């Protein structure tokens, strides 16, 4: 029997797609307008009654209510400083930087993730030479996995792959990255996304009966 219902899978797929777009791409006026038109803040699933999740929903709601096009530049600058610089990014989005003693890109944990993706037949067509352990790309893969899971009757293989992706490759470092986003974000939009992303991952841990792996972090 599948660990997740079809409704849960479709809901999780939708959230994963949103998080991929928000964390991997520069914010655009079209993205923010889409959030407003689809009332994303109010329709965001309530996974728990935690103060963290409630705060995230409130921050997102208030930001979107007050958003105007003249705030776009500040939002783009916030995204850039969090993830790319100039200078040292405040919340580096690549897993190997957290997991590598020398805080290197494309280190052995990235190679292990590449091997996992190759084994699963997962590939990316990216406009830039982007390391595959970018936090936003994980949610693109989860989007695909949840879609496939919802369409297959024999879900054991895809369940196992999803758990491996989360437990071994994302969850060991994602909490630190999201905490840094929340700490350093200059806009309530990215503070909200950090809190809601963590709540989503916490929900997956519970629903997939996972025991998060602990590992030493170097950032």
Image (cartoon, helix red, strand yellow):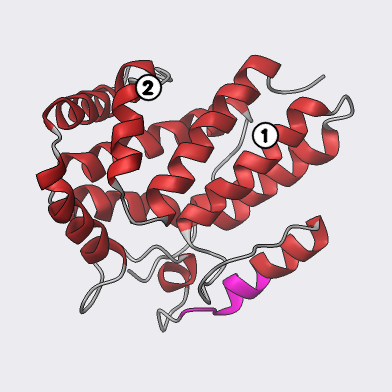
Tell me how far mark 2 sits from mark 1, CA to CA.
22 Å
Q: Secondary structure at mark 1?
A: helix
The residue pinned by badge 2 equals 38
Task: Judge whether residue 26 can be spotted in this image.
Answer: yes
Residue in the image at 12% along x and 51% along y: 186
Could you tell me which quadrant the C terminus lies in? bottom left
Residue in the image at 43% along x and 79% along y: 101
Magenta span: 105-112
Q: Secondary structure at mark 2?
A: loop
In which quarter of the view is residue 125 placed?
bottom right
Could you tell me which quadrant the N terminus lies in? top right
Residue 154 relative to residue 60: left or right: right
Q: Position of residue 11 (x, y in %)?
A: 56, 23
In which quarter of the view is residue 121 placed?
bottom right
Residue in the image at 76% along x and 41% along y: 160
The residue pinned by badge 1 equals 146
Please name whichever residue, 3 or 126, is drawn nearer the observer in this view of the structure.
126
């Amino acid at each position: 029997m599948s660990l997740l219902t079809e409704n849960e899978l479709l809901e999780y797929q939708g959230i994963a797609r949103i998080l991929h777009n928000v964390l991997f791409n520069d914010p655009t006026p079209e993205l923010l307008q889409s959030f407003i038109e689809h009332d994303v803040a109010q329709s965001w699933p309530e996974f728990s009654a935690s103060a963290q999740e409630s705060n995230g929903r409130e921050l997102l709601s208030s930001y979107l209510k007050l958003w105007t096009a003249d705030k776009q530049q500040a939002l783009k600058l916030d995204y850039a400083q969090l993830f790319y610089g100039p200078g040292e990014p405040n919340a580096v989005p690549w897993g190997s930087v957290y997991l590598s003693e020398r805080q290197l890109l494309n280190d052995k944990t990235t190679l292990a993730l590449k091997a996992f993706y190759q084994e699963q037949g997962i590939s990316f067509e990216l406009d830039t030479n982007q390391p595959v352990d970018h936090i936003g790309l994980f949610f693109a893969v989860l989007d695909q996995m949840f879609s496939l899971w919802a369409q297959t009757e024999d879900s054991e293989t895809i369940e196992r792959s999803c758990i491996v992706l989360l437990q071994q490759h994302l969850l060991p470092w994602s909490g630190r990255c999201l905490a840094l986003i929340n700490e350093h974000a200059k806009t309530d939009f990215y503070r909200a996304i950090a809190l809601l992303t963590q709540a989503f991952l916490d929900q997956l841990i519970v629903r997939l009966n996972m025991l998060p792996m602990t590992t030493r972090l170097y950032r």
